[in-house]
Amino acid sequence: MSDTSASVYPVTLSVEYPDRELNRATSIFRIILIVPVAIILFLVSGPGWDAGHQAWRFPFMAGGVLFLPTLLMLLFRRKYPRWWFDWNVNLTRFGLRVGAYFTLLTDVYPSSDEEQSVHLEVRYPDVRTELKTGLPLVKWFLAIPHYIILAFLFIGVIGAVIIAWFAILFTARYPRGLFDFVVGVMRWGIRVSSYAFLLVTDIYPPFRLD
């Protein structure tokens, strides 16, 4: 993909850099503090597989990202219902806020509805002019090269977050280079997710962090 097409990609993510001292105490115990909001995210992210009973479990859960219904609607009705789009985007935003908190990018506890310092913008698609009819069936397959690269990048994120944890412990600052790398991987990942699973664009995601 050219630089021009990448610059106008319909999915953008930015995270405000905390140019201040971060809270050491909440950073040290982040893995514990995140548990309540992680449970909430889990409950609104849909059903899961119960290995013990070899069955899907559904109790007290919302539907998660609407992938299969959206896929069928695009194929047979050429529509992406706006409230489905809003649900998918807002659930993704919530997940990103939780992810940003977990990776120490912010020390502000994730809100279930406020944007805070994590800004995800997704352009609502004109289905009939921007989305090809059969392409949603194979997007997940076409994105395989991205999955492979992201697997290695996420290993790098783990190392970056560990280093950042020690940096915050001693300096109360998140090294800017590590911050940009972690945000860049998140940005790459959300573009791939928006292409292959949210189904909001047919533009192939660029292989880049910025």
Image (cartoon, rainbow, N blue to C red):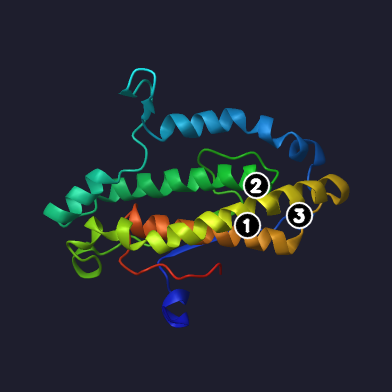
Closer to the chain start, of discs 3 and 1, is 3
- Name the mark nearer the viewer: 3 or 1: 1
Q: Amino acid at mark 2?
A: Thr
Image coords of residue 16 (percent x, y)? 65, 58
Up-down relation of residue 105 to residue 146 (above or below): above
12 left or right of 108 in image:
left
Image coords of residue 135 (percent x, y)? 22, 62
The residue carrying pointer 1 sits among few (fewer than 14), some (14 to 19) or many (20 or more) residues within 10 Å by Cα, namely many
Q: Which mark is residue 182?
A: 1
Up-down relation of residue 46 to residue 178 (above or below): above
- Residue indicated by mark 3: 174
- For this orientation, the residue located farthest to the right is 170
Q: Quadrant of residue 18?
A: bottom right
Q: CA distance from mark 1 to mark 2?
A: 8 Å
Closer to the chain start, of discs 3 and 2, is 2
Please give the name of the residue rendered at 34% of the width and 56% of the height, measured from the top-left corner: 196
Residues marked 1 and 2 touching at CB (< 8 Å):
yes
